[in-house]
Image (cartoon, grey):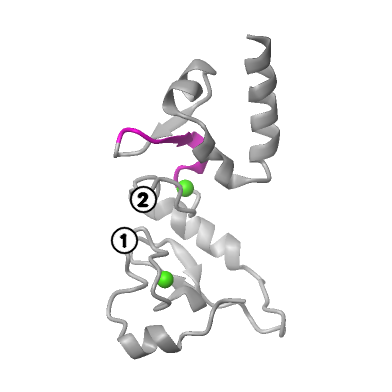
Amino acid sequence: MKLEIVSVIAFICCSLFVKSSTSAFTCDQLDRWKLPYYRCRSGDQCILTRYECDSVLDCTDFSDEDHCQTEHEVNCREDFKDKKTRNGEPLQSFPCQDKMCILGCQRCDGFRDCADNSDEIGCTETEVSLRPPCN
Ligand SMILES: [Ca+2]
Ligand SMILES: [Ca+2]
């Protein structure tokens, strides 16, 4: 029991910095620890509630982000506001169809970054192969 409490505290502290740590816990654990969580549509994966609609894909089936248009619009405005690249140019964003925002360089890079895959729709093979990696 004591070990579990220590684990919960460690988890909460670490998860402030390491988002991927959510995958290390099962629905049963989050349930037992009485932490608010969101069950991904697939049913066998759970994430902390605060990762639902945070504009980052956490569920492997993307269900934590596919119903969040309003939140995405707000996050998009805030995430890219006054952001500059290393060259001092405004950071480009790409709006997914569901209003989630990704980096402009993630469009047509061959990887699904939008929950609805709209960043990879209509891309030609040449476009994908010539796309330089984001940096
Ligand atoms: Ca998320
Ligand atoms: Ca992409």
**Disc 2 designates what residue?**
62
What's the amino acid at mark 1? Asp
Which quadrant holds residue 133?
A: bottom right
Which quadrant holds residue 17?
A: top right
Tag of residue 116 = 1
* Residue at x 38% of width, y 48% of height: 60
Q: Which image quarter is the N terminus in?
A: top right
Q: Is residue 11 magenta?
A: no
Q: Residues within 10 Å of mark 1 (few under 14, many from 20)?
A: some
- Residue 79, position in %: x, y? 59, 62
Callout 2: SS:
loop
Q: Is residue 51 magenta?
A: yes
- Residue 12, position in %: x, y? 65, 31
| Side (left or right) of 81 relative to 38 | right
| Side (left or right) of 133 relative to 127 | right
What are the residue bounds of the magenta stretch? 43-53
Labels 1 and 2: the sequence-earlier one: 2
Near-viewer residue (35 or 133): 133
| Side (left or right) of 134 relative to 58 | right
* Residue at x 47% of width, y 36% of height: 47
Q: Residue furthest top?
A: 1
